[in-house]
Image (tube, grey):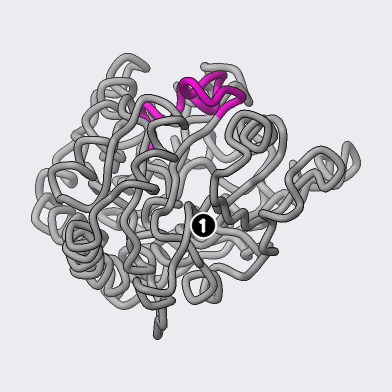
Amino acid sequence: MTKYVICERSLHHAHAGSKARDDIRRLLEQEAWQPFEVHPGENKGYFDKLLCVGYTIADWKRLERVVQSGDVVLVQFPLIMYNKVSLYALPSIRRMKTRGVRFIMLVHDLESLRGYSFTDFDKQWVAEADMLISHNPRMSKVLREYGATAPIKEIGVFDYLLPTVTPIPPEARHGIDIAGNLSHEKAGYIYRLATQFPDADINLYGPKFDEKQGPSAWYRGMYAPDELPGKLQGRFGLIWDGDSTETCTGFYGKYLAVNNPHKLSLYLASDKPVIIWNKAALASFVTQHGVGFAVDSMREAVQVERTIDKEEYLSMTKRAGELGAQLRGGYYTRRVVGELQAAMPQLQER
């Protein structure tokens, strides 16, 4: 039996968009999974979509010629490909399944929940999985609602591999870090913060910051994923999405109730406690591990950062550092891969 992981060329933007996929690939290769590269889409418009139809059909037919009965293929879903174009891979997958090849789908995102695509896109891919790796129980429930009948494993939290990390010492930190996509669509709340909380101490990092409407004094720049942990100045990392400071709103806000945000992994890998929306899927993970606070509004988030006792903060930072060391070493991915290895006989019987 040969185990393959589908890989797409990283786009290497200076944010965490490809970091989780790259880390999964690296850890699987360390466990003797063979990379099989396919073309990604690159958001270049209609003509590129037409080219990608041909690339997709050719790539997956090439995989058909390589695999044999009993082999296992892991797909990081969704592919970095135009959603509708990626559906051209499914006929090849179905043919391979009839030959005894089994497919594991590790879910990074459900596009339908983010408002990016039609629900049937997710459903068509999920239906072909012989095993699924979900984020958490809430996402697993959605996958079942989408018609998934395959066994589901849960990763719990994404790892964040780092060769070395030198975080800013706790005593030198200040304020709240907000890292990631800073567009109005995803993080509209940051453009209200300066008006509603002018005395807040905020550090912003990432792309798509609107300098004309945003508080430029808070903006710290944009860094590559492996560089960012050493640049984060805040005492806490914030996990919040949407347009409102009162609660998380819109598709992105609602998605936090199901998704494992990769920025949680970034903050913990930086030995940093977090503040997270209290209805987020990982709010209980944060509070149970004692690595942060779950809040219902930005007002509460600002208050927590201002008033936390020094000893409590240092204790929380220590726990965040212990958990961060696990993420930097790939603990959660290795654990779920171990569960996959144990389930291989069951997978072959499907």
Q: Quadrant of the N terminus?
A: bottom left
Using residue 288 as the reference point, say whether residue 71 is left or right of it.
right
Q: Which residue is mark 1?
A: 63
The quadrant of the image that shows the C terminus is: top left
Q: Nearer the viewer, residue 50 or 255?
A: 255
Magenta stretch: helix, strand or loop mostly: loop
The picture places residue 90, in percent across and down from the top left corner, at 52, 35
Q: Residue at 62%, 54% (x, y): give it.
A: 204
* Residue 117 horizontal side relative to residue 308, left or right: right
Q: Is residue 168 left or right of residue 347?
A: right
Give percent across and percent down for residue 30.
31, 78
User: What residue do we see at 47% from left, 71% from top?
Assistant: 229
> Within the magenta stretch, is there residue 248?
yes
Q: In x, y percent, where is residue 327?
A: 28, 66
Q: Say what amino acid the circle numbered 1 marks.
A: Leu
Return the x and y of residue 344 as percentages of the image width and height.
15, 53
Q: Is residue 221 above or below residue 100?
A: below
Frontmost residue, 342 versus 21: 21
Kindly tell me whether residue 212 is visible in this rendering.
yes
Q: Image quadrant of residue 293?
A: top left
Q: Residues within 10 Å of mark 1 (few under 14, many from 20)?
A: some
Q: Is residue 105 visible?
A: no
Q: Is disc 1 placed on a helix, strand or loop?
A: helix
Magenta segment: 242-259
